[in-house]
Image (spheres, rainbow, N blue to C red):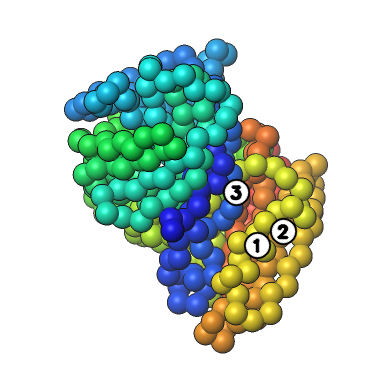
């Protein structure tokens, strides 16, 4: 049986290995992504072509960037699309002018690339001839499989569709460049400056922000700004960042002494107890010992901002070792939540990293 897909947002709880004992516990958060807009908006600042793919950046009627989407034509009137939302979430779009779908309903879908693992869940119908889904923590891994795969297989309640993945390796790279330029406000014609030989790529955007602008950034840039601020050494970003992100399905991954930190995306905004209940349900099967959990909402010192927190502790994850994972849900200016978590065998390590991250957020928000 395939792994489940969360409504609107495709999420996967596929088991992955992670820093020996710790990683096996931390796999996959449950958070759903932002609701997709109804259909495509107005084409904006960037357009591109790559083989059979054509793409654009799209904006709302007010001119605010919403997403980059590229599509290609396939037999029987089908169009396949890949996108990146303003928050950076990876999307799949299915379009056919012959369809007569009911907007704001769900379509159950199973998909897989070549002979890979099947993923099952709901696409949201956004217009009578289009449906789409956003992918959360697994988006990077899925995009990579689509870049390197040959055929995307999709089955719905009424049909089975096979899409040839011609030219996706280069085209998805162009899609990501469209998103990078559009989300940062760079002109579509601007080319990023080549880094100096041997230079490491920065974890966050080149231009640092202050105040509430921090809470408008994508998950990767939000976490990148925070972990690279303050005293160096407490948080360290791996040098092989792209590989690490694909491996752990993260928007950004960083190391703490004897622990890890993870940014996993922007999600919905329930209360803290609902977050705790859902996370406990997700983590319970992986805990072989006693599980305890707690939830609270804490103000960020010196601000009016409230952060929802969930702490989950397992006394034995199958190898005799305990693990603590602390989730912090920071409010995003989209009205949803940025998901940050810290995990370690020693609770003091996870709690210390969570506290240090919050301290750095406050410093950026209150900087003059």
Mark 1: few, some, or many residues within 10 Å (few <14, many ≥20)? Answer: few
State the separation of the CA atoms marked 3 and 1: 13 Å
SS assignment at label 2: helix
The one nearer the camera, 130 or 320, is 130
Nearer the observer: mark 2 or 3; the answer is: 2
The percent coordinates of residue 31 (x first, y second) are: 60, 49
- Circles 2 and 1: CB distance less than 8 Å? yes
Which mark, residue 277?
A: 2
Q: Is residue 309 left or right of residue 323?
A: right
Q: Quadrant of residue 231?
A: bottom right
Report whether residue 261 is seen. Answer: yes
* Identity of the residue drawn at 69% across and 74% down: 291
Per the image, the residue denoted by label 3 is 31
State the separation of the CA atoms marked 2 and 1: 6 Å
Residue 350's place in the image compared with 194, above or below, is below
* Identity of the residue drawn at 31% across and 55% down: 116
Mark 3: few, some, or many residues within 10 Å (few <14, many ≥20)? Answer: many
First-in-chain label (2 vs 3): 3
Report whether residue 183 is seen. Answer: no
Q: Is residue 191 left or right of residue 4?
A: left
State the separation of the CA atoms marked 2 and 3: 12 Å
Q: Quadrant of residue 234?
A: bottom right
Per the image, the residue denoted by label 1 is 281
* Identity of the residue drawn at 55% across and 12% down: 61
- Circles 2 and 3: CB distance less than 8 Å? no
The percent coordinates of residue 239 (x first, y second) are: 36, 60
Report the quarter where the C terminus lies. top right
* Identity of the residue drawn at 77% across and 55% down: 273
The percent coordinates of residue 13 (x first, y second) are: 50, 59
- Circles 3 and 1: CB distance less than 8 Å? no
């Amino acid at each position: 049986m395939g792994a489940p897909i969360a409504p609107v947002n495709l999420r996967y709880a596929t088991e992955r290995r992670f820093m020996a004992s710790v990683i096996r516990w931390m796999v996959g958060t449950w958070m759903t992504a932002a609701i997709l807009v109804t259909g495509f908006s107005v084409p904006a600042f960037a357009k591109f072509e790559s083989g059979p793919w054509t793409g654009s950046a799209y904006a709302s009627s007010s001119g605010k960037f919403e997403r980059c989407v590229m599509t290609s034509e396939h037999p029987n009137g089908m169009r396949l699309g890949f996108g990146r939302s303003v928050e950076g979430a990876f999307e799949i779009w299915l379009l056919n002018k012959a369809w007569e779908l009911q907007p704001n309903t769900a379509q159950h879908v199973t998909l897989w690339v070549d002979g890979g693992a099947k993923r099952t869940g709901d696409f949201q119908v956004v217009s009578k001839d289009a449906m789409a889904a956003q992918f959360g923590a697994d988006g990077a891994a899925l995009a990579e499989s689509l870049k390197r795969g040959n055929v995307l297989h999709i089955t719905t309640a009424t049909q089975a569709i096979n899409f040839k993945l011609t030219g996706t390796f280069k085209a998805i790279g162009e899609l990501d460049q469209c998103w990078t330029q559009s989300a940062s406000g760079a002109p579509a014609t601007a080319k990023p400056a080549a880094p100096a030989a041997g230079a490491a790529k920065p974890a966050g955007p080149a231009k640092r922000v202050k105040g509430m602008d921090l809470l408008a950034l994508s998950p990767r840039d939000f976490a990148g700004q925070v972990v690279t601020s303050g005293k160096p050494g407490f948080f360290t970003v791996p040098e092989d960042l792209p590989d690490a992100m694909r491996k752990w399905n993260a928007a950004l991954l960083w190391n703490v002494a004897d622990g890890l930190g993870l940014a996993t995306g922007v999600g919905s905004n329930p209360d803290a107890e609902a977050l705790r209940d859902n996370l406990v349900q997700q983590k319970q099967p992986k805990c072989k010992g006693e599980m305890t959990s707690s939830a609270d909402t804490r103000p960020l010192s010196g601000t009016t901002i409230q952060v929802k927190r969930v702490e989950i502790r397992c006394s034995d994850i199958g190898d005799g070792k305990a693990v603590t994972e602390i989730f912090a849900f920071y409010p995003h200016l989209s009205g949803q939540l940025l998901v940050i978590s810290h995990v370690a065998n020693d609770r003091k390590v996870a709690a210390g990293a969570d506290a240090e991250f919050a301290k750095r957020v406050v410093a950026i928000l209150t900087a003059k």
